[in-house]
């Protein structure tokens, strides 16, 4: 029912994290598979538990292309009705797939998301509630909770389980960072969805995290401005087209 798409360069400092991500997937109670885009990495470096799992498929790219491109190329290989983006250093909560899938199947909305937790090196967690409130949201309404590009993004990109056709229509943005902001707001603008007031994803905090690098702030403002403008423009275009169609 669900494909998890992960891009990775199989860096030595992340192999243990990737194995932990896989372990969190094995604890899910609904059928899933994963497509792992190896972003210029040697497939032989894939941790043994993942290499032995028939639910894991790999896409070996011949050279590094960046997370956004790697994820979009992996999207072509998804064959399930629902999709979830994930990072190679994070984890899902044990009921993440079941609770969102049951909501999607029962309501017919296009996406279902949840809250996330920051996972610290000592194993402790801290809940992050996104600005969008729990409940049902019509297509485009999530942008109401992202007033300015510099404000906190309205919804966690990797907390979203969505119909695959929607994700194909709003994939990763063409950015070196913040590409997942585009993916999140794109899906939420295209279709109604439901945000659950419970954590479904854990963001691992560690020194190798992209957001911890000195270069992160150099492009963050520009990436946010692009993603914010994309969400607003997409919503405006869809609403204009809808008005024209109604005559």
Image: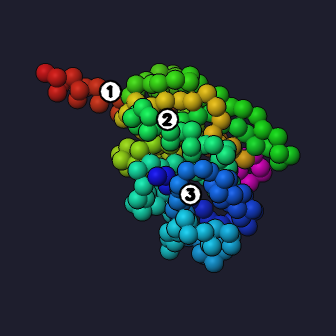
Residue 78 belongs to the span the image colors magenta: no
2 or 9, which is in the foreground? 2
Q: Position of residue 227 (x, y in %)?
A: 47, 37
Q: Position of residue 87 (x, y in %)?
A: 61, 52
Kindly report which numbered mark, 1 or 3, lies closer to the viewer in this rendering.
3
Residue displayed at 38% across by 43% down: 166
Dot placed on the residue nearer the N-terminal end, 2 or 1: 2
Q: Residues within 10 Å of mark 1 (few under 14, many from 20)?
A: some
C-beta proximity under 8 Å, tags 2 and 3: no
Label 1, on which residue? 236
Mark number, residue 6:
3
Mark number, residue 103:
2
14 or 200, which is in the foreground? 200
What's the magenta region?
205-212
Check the image and name the residue furthest to the bottom: 44
123 or 25, which is in the foreground? 25
Left or right of 122, for residue 68:
left
Q: Is mark 3 on a helix, strand or loop?
A: strand
Kindly report which numbered mark, 2 or 3, lies closer to the viewer in this rendering.
2
């Amino acid at each position: 029912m669900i494909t998890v798409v992960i891009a990775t360069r199989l860096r030595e400092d992340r192999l243990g994290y990737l194995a932990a991500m896989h372990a969190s997937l094995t604890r899910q109670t609904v059928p899933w598979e994963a497509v792992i885009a190896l972003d210029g990495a040697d497939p032989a470096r894939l941790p043994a538990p993942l290499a032995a799992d028939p639910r894991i498929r790999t896409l070996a790219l011949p050279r590094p292309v960046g997370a956004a491109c790697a994820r979009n190329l992996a999207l072509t290989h998804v064959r399930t009705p629902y999709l979830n983006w994930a990072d190679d250093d994070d984890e899902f909560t044990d009921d993440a797939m079941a609770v969102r899938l049951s909501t999607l199947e029962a309501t017919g909305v296009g996406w279902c998301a949840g809250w996330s937790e920051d996972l610290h090196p000592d194993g402790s967690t801290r809940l992050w509630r996104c600005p969008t409130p729990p409940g049902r949201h019509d297509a485009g309404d999530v942008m109401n909770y992202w007033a300015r590009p510099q404000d906190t993004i309205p919804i966690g990109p990797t907390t979203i389980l969505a119909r695959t056709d929607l994700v194909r229509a709003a994939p990763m943005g063409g950015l070196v960072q913040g590409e997942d902001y585009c993916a999140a707001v794109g899906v939420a603008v295209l279709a109604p969805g439901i945000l659950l007031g419970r954590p479904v994803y854990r963001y691992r905090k560690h020194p190798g995290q992209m957001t911890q690098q000195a270069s992160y702030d150099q492009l963050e403002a520009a990436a946010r401005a692009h993603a914010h403008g994309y969400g607003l423009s997409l919503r405006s275009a869809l609403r204009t087209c809808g008005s024209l169609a109604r005559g």
